[in-house]
Amino acid sequence: MTSAADPGAERTPRTTARGRGAIALGIIVLAVLTLWRVVLPARDGGPHDFTGATMGTTYTVRIDAPLTAGERATLADTIQARLAEVDALMSTWDTASELSRFNRHGSSEPFPVSPLMIEVMRIALDVGRQSGGAFDVTVAPLVDAWGFGPAGEPQNLPDERMLADLRARTGQDLVRIDSAHQALVKIDARTVLDLSAVAKGYGVDRVADALAASGLRSYLVEVGGELRVGGPKLDGTPWRIGVEQPDPGARRVHRTIDLVDAAVATSGDYRNFFERDGRRWAHIIDPRTGRPVPYAGASVTVLHDRAAVADAWATALTVLGPLQGLDVAERANLAVVFITRTDSGFVVSGSTRFGQRFDRAAPDTSQR
Ligand code: AMP
Ligand code: MG
């Protein structure tokens, strides 16, 4: 019986050489795909959030990228390690921190410090100079005297004589950086430093720099309200940040700002204040008077490439207030916006640079 005479043979065509090739290719593709899944574990599309506690506050990091479980775990460790490092260097609350050890060093001999401490001090002294002393890292004795330091509330608040005495021990020309020895030097051996107004921002920068170095493009890093974003989000749209209304009673977004590759810090008298003699006072000292900044229902938001610089400026501009602060911000070419409470509502005043770079910032009406 020939195949030609067999009708069944016509219905079942023999496998040709081309067909066999296609099957082999299919098997190879399947094998590669299977191997691929074994060798390269599944990626979760994200965004991925990492949260925790640091520097007496909380942090949130959002990474907008597909990550494997292993990559997630490594990034969580990196984030924690970077924040713990800044805390271990710059905390005034931790008696073993590098800063606390420098503060106890009662001598004008150079005190060797880490490169990170030198970097933060350069930023602090630079903002101190440009703000005419409104930002002052030597403000620690006044911070303690008013009861915002680690020791808590004192029995008696400082009187005029004590203030005069404490003010004589403050001023940033009482400390200098000795670059040759990578050290800090006290001009007055009693000088003590407080880096609380810049350290959170610096921690944000340290984390953001680590994420960028590991090849990530889209991320948001926030520590205690100071934040920095990398790139736009994965879908190409900017990160949208809410700026709060300076209102102690309500947590309301007053404005939103769209950000790409930028840092934002907000300072104000409305969130961290204390009440005494029927008045409210901010936890920020005006080094010119030695007294806390009186509550006025104001906030200032500063945008900059580096969160540490934005953080320091936000504190400095809170001391200066909207009028003088805007002048100083213009001179320093800063992008800042003040929100001030008045009898007829909140008044918003931005610097020229803020208007140029962030004119898309608009009052957010969705939460009213
Ligand atoms: P921030 O929340 O960034 O505005 O920092 C406020 C903290 O900075 C306060 O709790 C003080 O420890 C410290 N501080 C207060 N006044 C000043 C000042 N004029 N310059 C620098 N640091 C200050
Ligand atoms: Mg600050």
Image (tube, grey):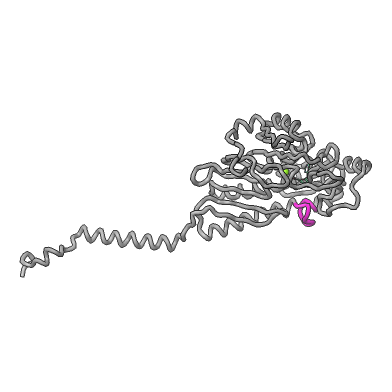
The answer to which of 194 and 345 lies nearer the viewer is 345
The answer to which of 33 and 247 lies nearer the viewer is 247
- Up-down relation of residue 304 to residue 80 (above or below): above
Q: In the shown orientation, is residue 275 left or right of residue 232?
A: right
Q: In which quarter of the image is residue 172?
A: top right
Q: In the shown orientation, is residue 31 left or right of residue 87?
A: left
Residue furthest out toward the bottom: 1
Percent position of residue 44, x then y: 49, 57
Q: Residue at x 62, y 40 (%)?
A: 255
Q: Is residue 122 visible?
A: no
Q: Quadrant of residue 364?
A: top right
The answer to which of 135 and 180 lies nearer the viewer is 135
The answer to which of 114 and 236 lies nearer the viewer is 236
Q: Is residue 237 visible?
A: yes
User: In the image, is residue 97 part of the stretch drawn in magenta?
Assistant: yes
- Up-down relation of residue 249 to residue 18 (above or below): above
Percent position of residue 201, x then y: 68, 46
Q: How many marks do you count on the picture?
A: 0
Q: Main secondary structure of the magenta part?
A: loop
Q: Residue at x 71, y 29 (%)?
A: 331
Location of the C terminus by quadrant is top right
Location of the N terminus by quadrant is bottom left
Percent position of residue 224, x then y: 68, 50
Q: Quadrant of ligand 2?
A: top right
Q: Residue at x 41, y 60 (%)?
A: 36
* The magenta segment: 91-100
Percent position of residue 247, x then y: 71, 43
User: In the image, is residue 13 part of the stretch drawn in magenta?
Assistant: no
